[in-house]
Amino acid sequence: MTQYFRNSILLLLTCLTIIGCEREPDAGSSGSGEKDYKYFLLSALGSWPNTVHYMTATNDLTQGAMDITKEGDEINSKGTYSYIVKNGFIYNYKTDQGVFKKFKYTQDRLTTAKEVPYTYISDISSYVWVDDNTLVLVGETGDGQHIRYTVFNASDLSIIRQGEIEGFQPFPDAYNFYTLGSMTYMDGQIYLQYSYRNGKWITPEYYNFAVIDYNTFKVKHSVGDNRSSGVANGSPYFKTAFRKDNEAFYYACFPRIGAGTSKIQLFRTLKGATSPDATYQINLTDLVGGKTLETMIDYIGNNKMVILYRDPALGNTYNGRYAIVDIQTKQLVRVLDELPGDEPYEQAVFVQNKKLYIAVNASKGGNYVWIYDLQTDKITRGMKLPDNISGFARFDKLYD
């Protein structure tokens, strides 16, 4: 992740000094800020690994400004920024403390609504909501040789059931560990991307796809697909897959270095199918002229998706470009070149009410929210965002 953090330790100390002088993160006055928020932003200060993340929020992205010297909360001590967000709450697995937490951001503070002891998986490799109150987490054991699941009741974080997923294909020669990709849920089935790796994180030149019965968590079907190696990143840090209209699961494959072609492919599996759709494939790398794609894709409606890639024409650092792709025609619709060059982090894009909201950490002109109207194909500039930061670790809505 070092490519995302180029600011110096001096910047971190400077920013923290400013924050400390203006307002201590934990010493805000009671009742400051709104009780409930619609949108939040995580800003990263400093260079990896000495990075501090600061949370701010708003109910209006079209105007105003976020100022981390006057509002918000430092969140590193409370949890990671591996956030699962639903119905105004944030769910987080803090592995170093062995707890699973449910947060609420209210009155400019990230407050713990509930936490429970949890160490059943080493980390969240993938997750999916079965309904508004049922959350499924999937992850490996510490030895990387078993895949476990936990089904949580999101209201009180009680465990509905948990266990090991049974029926994956055995390890092939020279590969002794699992690596998990994205997953989704459709009509009683869980669809999961997975692969294998060795001790040097080399993967075979194919990936696997499993259809799992939700009631038993046993693999019903598992097949290999040699059209690409690697898997998507299904953790809450990234967005590399999506479900469209409860009809199909779209996911990207990100091959590791040394595992065949490095081109990023988009595949899909239709609801009720036992294997990936052999007729469907988009070479996203070729679609953007052979440029490097980042681990961020999302569905934005009307058979369109947004992707993020790096454009060397913008320079050596702030060179992120967003583009719209038609997943039905498999064509590049357009590049959002009205936006300034961005320094990509993890997730800085979401869609709501047929508008795409993008938090841009710009090289020139300051940082802003940019709003792309999918119906009019127009882009406008919205809220002012914090400057002099390493990047935006997460920009998202708190409600669907």
Image (tube, rainbow, N blue to C red):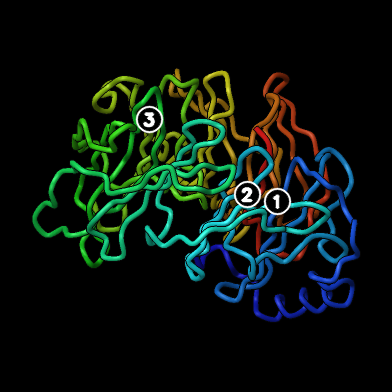
For the point 80% across and 60% down, the residue is 72
Residue labelled with disc 2: 90
Q: Earlier in the sequence, mark 3 or mark 1?
A: 1
SS for callout 2? strand
Please state if 198 lies on the left or on the right of 79 as rendered: left
Q: Position of residue 328 (x, y in %)?
A: 45, 18
Q: Position of residue 23 (x, y in %)?
A: 87, 71
Q: For the residue marked with disc 1, what is the amino acid? A: Lys
Q: Position of residue 73 (x, y in %)?
A: 76, 63
Q: Earlier in the sequence, mark 2 or mark 3?
A: 2
How many numbered marks have been drawn onto this rendered protein structure?
3
Q: Position of residue 222 (x, y in %)?
A: 20, 35
On the image, which quarter does residue 165 sit in? top left
- Kindly report the distance in space between the C-alpha atoms of the residues bearing marks 1 and 2: 6 Å
Q: For the residue marked with disc 2, what is the amino acid? A: Ile
Please state if 122 lies on the left or on the right of 108 as rendered: left
State if disc 2 and disc 1 touch (CB < 8 Å).
Answer: yes
Residue labelled with disc 1: 104
Please state if 83 lies on the left or on the right of 354 as rendered: left
Q: Which mark is residue 282?
A: 3
User: As displayed, is residue 334 above or below residue 262?
Assistant: above
SS for callout 1? strand
- Kindly report the distance in space between the C-alpha atoms of the residues bearing marks 3 and 1: 39 Å
Q: Nearer the viewer, residue 248 or 131?
A: 131
Q: Nearer the viewer, residue 322 or 280?
A: 280
Dot 1 crowding, Cα within 10 Å, few <14, some 14–19, many 20+:
some
